[in-house]
Structure formats: C-alpha cells, structure tokens
Image (spheres, helix red, strand yellow):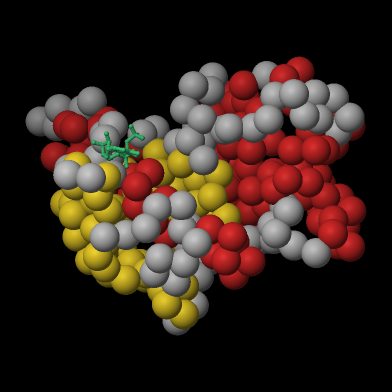
Amino acid sequence: MLEVRDLHVSYGKARAVQGVSLRVGEGEIVALIGANGAGKSSTMHAICGVTKPALGAISFRGKDITGLPAHRVVPLGIAQVPEGRLIFDDLTIEENLVLGGITLPGGSERQRMARVLDLFPVLAPRTGEPASNLSGGQQQLLAIARGLMSNPTFLMLDEPSLGLAPLAAQEVFDLFVTLRRNGVTILLVEQNVRQALAIADRGYVIESGRIILEDESARLLEDEGLARAYLGIERQ
Ligand code: ATP
C-alpha cells in the first residue's frame, strides 16, 4: 500500500532522515520505533506532505506521491494524527471533528461524524463541549477521531500513547486493533515499544535517520539489542 524508498529529509544542514526505506501492506499495523530525534516524525511528515523530502521516492497504492502537498495527499486516503494531539482547545469536540474532514465535500459530513463517533462512545454525548473539558486520554481519542474524519484507509499516528496513564494508553492501542478490523491500515510511531509491537505485525527500528532493524514484531521483541535499548531488559 505504501512504499518509501531511500528517503532523505533535511532541515538546512541537519540531516534528519538519511535513506529510509519501508513498506506497509494493506491491512497491516506497522510500528516505527526509535529514540527522540531519530527521524520518526520527519519520515511521517514527508509521507503526508508536510515536509518535502530532499531525496527518495514515496508511493501510495502505486501512485507516486513524492513531494505532494498535504492537501493533495489527504484526499488519497492518508491521514496523520500528530504528536502532542494538537487539538483546538477553544473549539468544541464537534468543531474539531469538522476540521478533520475539511478536505472532503461538506454534504457527507454528518454521516462521517456519526460513523466516527460510533467508535468513540466517550466523545459522542459531549460533542457540544469545548475540547479543553476532556482529559488527556480523551483528547488523544479526539485527535484520532479527527484524523478519521477524512475517511483514511491509511492512518499514521505519532506517539499516540505519550503522556497517557496505562489504562488510557491501553484503550488507545485496543482502538487500533478495532480500526484495522474496520479496514484501516496503520503506521504507528511509538516509544512505548512493547505495547506497539504487541499489536503490530511488523516493525522498523530507526536510529540517527537510518533503519537499523526490521522484522516481524514477535522476532523484534526477542531481539537482544532492541530489548536492551528500548525495553530496559538485560537478557541472560
Ligand atoms: P521525537 O520523538 O523527539 O519527535 P523523532 O524521531 O520524531 O523524535 P524528528 O522529530 O523527525 O525525530 O527529528 C529528527 C531530527 O531532525 C532531530 O535531530 C531534530 O532535532 C531535527 N528536526 C526536526 N524538525 C526540525 C525542524 N523543523 N528544523 C530543524 N531541525 C529539525
């Protein structure tokens, strides 16, 4: 579904991504794992057209989307839920959702919102409230719901469990499994490595802008280097 080949992203002289290649197949959940500053967000920004790649190629369902601006990428079925939620506190839950679907024709908005809210029973009765009334975990759910308002078939999430209490984080991970069942393919950036790999089919490990490891999730969880670096485990 998505293929990234030899992607390079630079900010002036800073080389954030240096030759990343990855693939995501339809129906998969794929985790992109790495420490702060490894280049995870830059990779996602390049895919969804927020940042222009310096080099490399990105294709989605066989169509070359390299360097396409975000407003042309989203209608193809790609959405990103950014790191830190970035919801609009002063707007209502409903208004936040409307903004998530702004690239689609207005006529289908009510239907889309009803379908999205079906997945979020905690948000559904509160759509008239300001988003600032929500707890951190609920705001994360709103950010995901907003991402779904553009009807994506491919959803990218940047650190969705960051700052959440364990139960709220688990709710978010459970939701991804439901979304996949509903036909959404997922690329997940996470530092919560164990939980991400528990639901992902495959994972890539990125370090200093380069992919250093890729494998099926179960095998990554057994990898000694990964366990030491990201799971805090010293194997005997
Ligand atoms: P984090 O989890 O901290 O967001 P990340 O793996 O997502 O980390 P990126 O945000 O992609 O990493 O950053 C990769 C590198 O690029 C870092 O060294 C970062 O400081 C740098 N960088 C990111 N955005 C910019 C920018 N807009 N201008 C300059 N440098 C940037």
Quadrant where the C terminus sits is top left
Question: Percent x, y for residue 195?
Answer: 43, 37
The answer to which quarter of the image holds residue 198 is top left
Residue placed most toward the observer, 12 or 196: 12
Q: How many marks?
A: 0
Does residue 138 appear left or right of residue 73 in this picture? right
- Kindly indicate the quadrant of the structure image that contains residue 6: bottom left
Q: Residue at x 72, y 20 (%)?
A: 132
Q: Position of residue 175 (x, y in %)?
A: 62, 44
Q: Quadrant of ligand 1?
A: top left
Residue at image coords 51%, 40%: 82
Q: Which residue sits furthest left?
A: 236
**Residue extending furthest front?**
12
Q: Position of residue 53 (x, y in %)?
A: 32, 59
Q: Is residue 68 left or right of residue 9?
A: right
Name above or below for residue 174 compared with residue 17: above
* Residue 152 in view in this figure: yes
Whether residue 222 is visible, yes or no, is: no
Residue at 89%, 62% in the rendered image = 107
166, above or below 63, in the image: above
Give the x, y percent position of residue 181.
Answer: 63, 59
**Of 119 and 144, the residue lying toward us:** 144
Give the image quarter of residue 30.
Answer: bottom left
* Position of residue 152 in the picture relative to residue 112 (left or right): left
* Residue at figure coordinates x 69%, y 44% from the top left: 146
Whether 95 is drawn above or below 60: the answer is: above
User: Can you say whether 71 is above or below 205 in the image?
Assistant: below
